Amino acid sequence: MAKSPPRLFVEEPLGADLTVGLTLAHVHYLKSVLRLKPNDMVALFNGRDGEWHGELTWHGKSEALVALKRRMCPQEIENPVAVGPTLMFAPIKRGPMEILVQKATELGVRRLCPVITEYTDVVRINAERLHATAVEAAEQCERLSVPSLQEAKPLMDILDDWPESDRLIWAAEAGPVRPIAEALADFKPVGADAEGFAKDTPSCGWTIAVGPVGGFSPVEQEVLRSLPFVIPVGLGPRLLKAETAALAALSCWQSVLGDWAMRPIDRNHQ
Amino acid sequence: MAKSPPRLFVEEPLGADLTVGLTLAHVHYLKSVLRLKPNDMVALFNGRDGEWHGELTWHGKSEALVALKRRMCPQEIENPVAVGPTLMFAPIKRGPMEILVQKATELGVRRLCPVITEYTDVVRINAERLHATAVEAAEQCERLSVPSLQEAKPLMDILDDWPESDRLIWAAEAGPVRPIAEALADFKPVGADAEGFAKDTPSCGWTIAVGPVGGFSPVEQEVLRSLPFVIPVGLGPRLLKAETAALAALSCWQSVLGDWAMRPIDRNHQ
């Protein structure tokens, strides 16, 4: 099997006969880390135009251009439904938060939505670094898009502005709940096609919410339980770290309502 | 709510009126990190005798004893079935491997089983460090046991010695498979009780297997597919890192066949 060319996320439009200039960071990566040579192939995606393969040329020490040759995947192969739910998470320490963003990207989140709760004790978010983490994970896991990173907002503001048709899966640390597999099964689309995802997916959006270290406060828990769009779920008898709870809930969501009936794209047979 | 006492895993037997000596590392942690005082409470578990609370006393600079007062949970509360499957994984780099061990412990694995495959390029495992990671995760997630870490063995040797009744869920990176939720649903116990786990669970043991970076080799894939106890499953269209695949598969297993209908133990109401 031919080795796949390195995949890079770019902002520029991609299309037939276009040439794309790369950033300094990309040039460094391709030249000094991967030691690519002129005419080597590179794969580019921008979250809009699918994935393209193109030929690399160097211009001087710090410039590189990619002459696009062939579209390997249309953007539509990544069904918007397939790029799963929003993940709402209270900012945690830098290391675990980067793990959370990296794994959530691999697990197909659509948006990353930091939320300030009563027990949130980390308030500084390095948005640039988290975005870079998401980009790198998207490049490696062969997504055609990068999850968007929202600005941090207070939990109560988000709940006040909640779109009526959207649902919020809350990994509840205490109180009565249904186990997550049982709760999600209620929503399994009936009209799922052979690839396992519903053509007639309802327009509802999904969010998965996990609390900070220490969980949501008693007041927040009471509010969450009172809202009709919130589905409190249980993730078993062990106390999961925030990032573990997020990834466990996302995995279950994807396995029941997401795109896990699909297989990795075989780019050699497009 | 009273703050829970720190939980420590010890090797010694636990029981009424026993006094347990702590290791130097525990003494340092309780004294210098948590700054506990004489008569402060400590929770101990050893994987055999449940969880006990006891009173701390210092003896000199580096010795500490815990006089056990009360059993907070019997060991039987952690159903052996509840402490899930074995995780078979090819050794990966130190950082991701520690994440894998930490999260797999939180997600309730029973055994950690490193496996040498054709594409395994990390051969050195720091067993002591991985055990310490599992212990710390068990202390924090309130397990009553620590998953055992097996010695690394070649994949083919493990498959040759496979116990006839045990099943192997293989997160297959290529080829035809069923999505994991669908494959697991076949095994959902019919006689599950109100807490959601089967009293009459069949004696079969479960293992979840993930490959190294690059996956299993074509020959290994062919062998895995040919074995009657292997269930190849899919985890969707994105290429997951080895540790992400392990955690995603474990989460799905727990949500369908494990103990996720149970809730965290409320030690204040024992």
Image (tube, coloured by chain):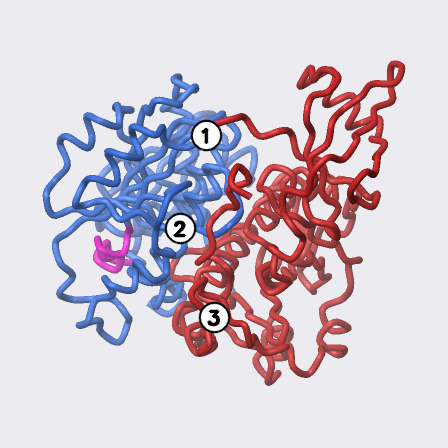
Chain colours: A blue, B red
Q: Is residue A243 above or below residue A43?
A: above
Q: Is residue A210 left or right of residue B138?
A: left
Q: Of the residues tagged 3 and 2, which is closer to the observer?
A: 2
Front residue (pair B74, B144): B74
The reply to whether discs 1 and 2 touch (Cβ–Cβ < 8 Å) is no
Q: Is residue B99 above or below residue B223?
A: above
- Residue beneath label 3, please? B233
- Residue beneath label 2, please? A234
Q: Amino acid at mark 3?
A: Val
The reply to whether discs 1 and 3 touch (Cβ–Cβ < 8 Å) is no
Q: Is residue B93 magenta?
A: no
Badge 2 element: strand
**What residue is at 44 percent from the left and 25 percent from the top?**
A62
Q: Amino acid at mark 1?
A: Gly
Q: Is residue A195 above or below residue B266?
A: below
Query: Which labelled disc corresponds to residue A28?
Result: none
* Residue range (magenta): A73-84
Badge 3 element: strand
**What residue is at 80 percent from the left and 27 percent from the top?**
B25
Q: Chain of mark 3?
A: B
Query: Which labelled disc corresponds to residue A214?
Result: 1
**What residue is at 25 percent from the left and 65 percent from the top?**
A188
Q: Residues within 10 Å of mark 2 (few under 14, many from 20)?
A: many
